Amino acid sequence: MSIETAPPTTEADLSGQDPDDLGLRRADYRTLFYTMFLQREFEERIYRLFRQGRLDGAAYAGAGHEAIAAGSGYALAEQDVLLPMHRVLGTHFLRGHTPRDMMCQYMGRANGPTRGRDGNMHCGSVDKKIISMISHLGSNIPVAVGVALAAKIRKENLVALTFIGEGGTSIGDFHEGLNFAAVRKLPMVLIIENNKFAYSTPAALEYACENLIDRAPGYGIPGVLIDGTDVREVYKATKAAVDRARNGDGPTLIEARCTRLLGHAQHDPASYVPKEVLEEGWKNDPVVKAENMLVDDQHFSPEEIEAIKTEVVGVVDDAVSFAEKSPRPAPEDALKDVYAD
Ligand SMILES: Cc1ncc(C[n+]2csc(CCOP(=O)(O)OP(=O)(O)O)c2C)c(N)n1
């Protein structure tokens, strides 16, 4: 998490606790949970704002994907490049987009990252090393491969991390990108967010192999299957893949299993998803799991967890009122930054 957005750290967080088996301390766990809860709360709010007609564009949520966002984003080093997709909002926060920035973006305000001039999830930042997602599924992958290729040619020590849904793995870009990255041993990590549905298409109609990482040996790269609802597991797998890429050993394919807990987007009640799938998914809610893990293993009291949640709700309240007071873009600015001066 960048300096401007890092949640306040208490003395207890900084106490001389030794790092655990993953090299993480209490302050790291606080940031991981804070990020997950911030994604959940922020997206709940944008759903509500959408229904009230206060939000521009559509509203997508990554409910069920919060551990994937926080655990993977936290495994990156400052110089690495992030290419997020539509269910990993938490990665934006970890790289320094503030809740105010993102709320201005969602509300189409002039002081949002795209200055109110692009779709709400479509924002990046050169300084923060975030490349805006591309709506066309799969297109992020060749871009990540290009970033990794450039880094290798320029001998820059950076890794590109990107994502794809299990539905998107059927697109040609997945094969072309992954094959090129494997052949050239490029520093790239690709995480498949396998949430069981691509819009209304169930996984059984999307691919015939048992696991999507079964494809990895075909490219000559490692494939790692993980529980995408367990933030420690996501961090551990991503960190290992990032370290491997940084060492010049090439890309890794990670398949993170989770459940899409809501519809495809706000407009979709997801009545086609079997009740049992959703019940099972909510039983494995990654945010609740992280909360329990913090209490059981990391010695946070339930009161401390509540305090983090209250703080996050306040941060999101502030983001909404800041965005609503912010100006809309001026029509004459529409072409600003489109062409080089
Ligand atoms: C090439 C392309 N085809 C179709 C779409 C429309 N679309 C957007 S998201 C989506 C479903 C994606 O499913 P999946 O890849 O499994 O990701 P999820 O949304 O479940 O996280 C579709 C069909 C698109 N954006 N791009």
Image (cartoon, rainbow, N blue to C red):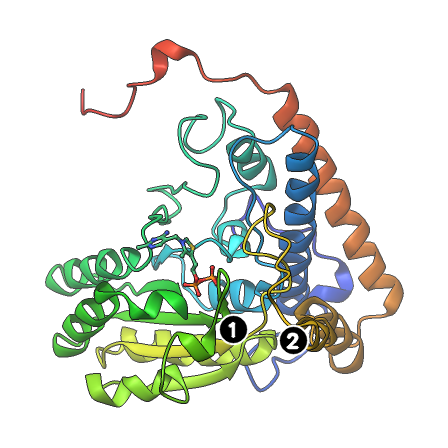
Give the Cα separation between the discs numbered 1 and 2.
9 Å
Query: Quadrant of the rendered structure where residue 178 is?
Result: bottom left
Residue 196 is marked as 1
For marks 1 and 2, the one nearer the N-term is 1
Element marked by disc 2 = helix
Where residue 309 sits: x, y (%)? 78, 54
Q: Is residue 204 visible?
A: yes
**Left or right for 135, reference 4:** left
Number of numbered markers: 2
Whether residue 304 is situated above or below residue 206 in the rendered picture:
above
Name the residue type under label 1: Lys
Outermost residue toward the right? Answer: 303
Element marked by disc 1 = loop
Query: Crowding at label 2, few (<14), some or many (≥20) Cα neighbours within 10 Å?
Result: some
Query: Quadrant of the rendered structure where residue 302 is?
Result: bottom right
Tag 1 and tag 2, C-beta contact below 8 Å? yes
**Left or right for 137, reference 279:** left
Where residue 113 sits: x, y (%)? 44, 33
Where residue 27 sits: x, y (%)? 66, 65
Name the residue type under label 2: Val
